[in-house]
């Protein structure tokens, strides 16, 4: 049943011009940023060679691309997740799902898997940008793999939070604005000016757990942070929908 819900949601997403428009906009912006980083690298390359610098294309092109890409996708993700459950509630089709022989958890997980499918396609397209550099140079493939893992976890986290906030309201616009607010807060929460790098704000920050992946560092604490945030968001969405289901 989870696959049925995911398939239904995927069809709805890809039959909608919104999903294609957002994917197209995301790729155009990221491709432009990629070209800008390559141009900057080409200008710096003689100085790097003269100074025998260890910095390479992975440091100066790939890492900045994914760093900027995380913010671009933060701005676009709520537009995709806003309608996942809020539209069902506004149109009344949520009652049809509640009356079907399917659990609330299956509804939430099905919709979440649909979003992961969309972002999986997007991540594949993004990966083609740095991989194209292999046609004329070399890359640190291990670091690229870590970067893609970090981006995948970040997008999964964006989706889970957006899905949860979509379950709280019947207005997709409210869900989108709420997602923007919460995701942006988690992105900048460590900019408190505190020197305590092990403090609560630093631990809560998406950036402090995402950017080590850009350096090729995969830490168990960062993996646990993303998984905890994803699981907590999905559980809260399930709990809220289950309360609504029982309340009629």
Image (tube, rainbow, N blue to C red):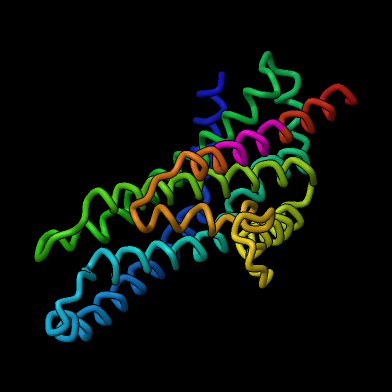
Q: Is residue 39 left or right of residue 184?
A: left
Q: Name the residue furthest left.
A: 136
The image quadrant where one finds the C terminus is top right
**Residue at the spot 62% in from the left edge and 23% down from the top edge:** 106
Q: Is residue 53 above or below residue 149?
A: below
Q: Is residue 29 above or below residue 104?
A: below
Q: Position of residue 206 (x, y in %)?
A: 57, 55
| Residue 12, quarter of the rendered image | top right
Q: Which residue is at the front of the view, 235 or 205?
A: 205
Q: Position of residue 236 (x, y in %)?
A: 73, 34
* Chain part drawn in magenta: 227-235
Q: Residue 62 magenta-drawn?
A: no
The image quadrant where one finds the N terminus is top right
Q: Residue 230 magenta-drawn?
A: yes
Q: Is residue 175 left or right of residue 153?
A: right
Q: Is residue 122 left or right of residue 48?
A: right
Q: Position of residue 5 (x, y in %)?
A: 57, 27
Q: Give the dominant element type of the magenta stretch: helix, strand or loop.
A: helix
Q: Which residue is at the front of the view, 37 or 106?
A: 37
């Amino acid at each position: 049943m989870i696959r049925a819900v995911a398939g239904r949601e995927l069809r709805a997403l890809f039959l909608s011009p919104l999903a294609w428009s957002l994917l197209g906009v995301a790729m155009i912006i990221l491709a432009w940023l990629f070209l800008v980083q390559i141009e900057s690298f080409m200008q710096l390359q003689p100085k790097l060679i003269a100074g025998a610098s260890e910095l390479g294309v992975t440091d100066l092109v790939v890492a900045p691309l994914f760093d900027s890409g995380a913010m671009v996708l933060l701005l676009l993700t709520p537009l995709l997740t806003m309608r996942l459950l809020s539209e069902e509630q506004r149109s009344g089709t949520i009652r049809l799902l509640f009356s079907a022989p399917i659990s609330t958890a299956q509804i939430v997980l099905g919709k979440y898997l649909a979003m992961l499918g969309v972002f999986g396609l997007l991540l594949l397209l993004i990966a083609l940008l740095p991989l194209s550099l292999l046609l004329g140079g070399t890359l640190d493939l291990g670091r690229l793999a870590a970067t893609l893992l970090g981006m995948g976890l970040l997008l999964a986290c964006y989706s889970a939070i957006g899905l949860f906030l979509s379950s709280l309201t019947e207005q997709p616009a409210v869900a989108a604005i709420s997602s923007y607010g919460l995701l942006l807060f988690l992105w900048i929460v460590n900019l408190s000016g505190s020197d305590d790098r092990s403090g609560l704000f630093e631990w809560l920050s998406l950036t402090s757990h995402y950017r080590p992946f850009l350096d090729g560092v995969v830490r168990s604490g960062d993996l646990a942070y993303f998984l905890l945030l994803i699981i907590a968001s999905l559980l809260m969405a399930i709990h809220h929908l289950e309360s609504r289901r029982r309340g009629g």
